[in-house]
Amino acid sequence: MALLTPVTDEDGAPFWEYTARGELRIQACAAPDCGELRFPPRPCCPHCQSFDSEWRLMSGRGRIWSYVLPHPPLLPDYAELAPYNAVLVELADAPRIRLAGNVVAAPDAPLNSVDPARLRIGAAVKVAFTEIDGVAVPRWLLERG
């Protein structure tokens, strides 16, 4: 089975370097009067147009902002995992930043390891990382069993 893996570009490479260390970091503008967080990563701040940036460590906590249960699965390698979830998580430290991923029972658990009936908009989650084809991918664990 071949699950999709991220495509790394120059702007996003640091994000994946940090996930390999087990850190969730988000790009921020390093201009003294700005400091806005941005995701996906890009070379220029959309708020002040500065090219200065840094990567800020996040707590790894958030809330499910939205989710879907893909049906029917469009990719053959995902069909055997149905039903599984795809979520958007709003970060607790950066409410305007939302990351896509999956809620799983454990970092290395399959995508279908959480009963879809347990998912709720607003449910608290925390990040966990698992390696897929050499890339540490963020996944999400429900904060309350």
Image: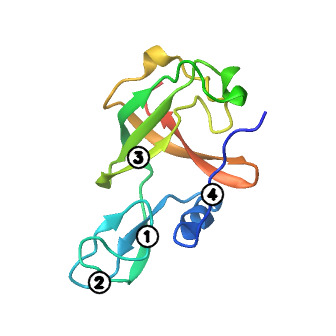
Q: Is residue 77 left or right of residue 19?
A: right
Instruction: Nearest to the eye among marks 2 and 1: give it.
Output: 1
Instruction: Tell me the number on the disc at residue 42.
Output: 1
Secondary-structure class at tag 2: loop
Residue neighbourhood size for the residue with mark 2, other residues' Cα within 10 Å, grouped as few (<14), some (14–19), many (≥20)? some
Name the residue carrying label 3: 61
Amino acid on which disc 4 is placed: Val
Q: Please provide percent x and percent y for residue 123.
A: 36, 30
Q: Find the distance from the CA under tag 4 to the CA under tag 1.
A: 14 Å
Q: Is residue 64 left or right of residue 133?
A: left
The answer to whether the residue labelled 2 contacts the one labelled 1, judged by CB atoms less than 8 Å apart, is no
Instruction: Nearest to the eye among marks 4 and 3: give it.
Output: 4
Amino acid on which disc 2 is placed: Ala
Name the residue carrying label 2: 31
Q: Please provide percent x and percent y for residue 138.
A: 56, 48
Q: Please provide percent x and percent y for residue 71.
A: 53, 19
> In the rendered view, would you say 21 is above or below 66?
below
In the rendered image, which quarter is residue 135 located in?
A: bottom right
> In the rendered view, would you say 130 is above or below 117?
below
Residue farthest to the left, as pictured: 33
Secondary-structure class at tag 1: loop
Secondary-structure class at tag 4: loop
Secondary-structure class at tag 3: strand
Name the residue carrying label 4: 7
The answer to whether the residue labelled 4 contacts the one labelled 1, judged by CB atoms less than 8 Å apart, is no
Amino acid on which disc 3 is placed: Arg
Amino acid on which disc 1 is placed: Arg
Q: Find the distance from the CA under tag 2 to the CA under tag 4.
A: 28 Å
Q: Find the distance from the CA under tag 2 to the CA under tag 1.
A: 15 Å
Which residue is found at the position 71% from the left and 27% from the top? 76
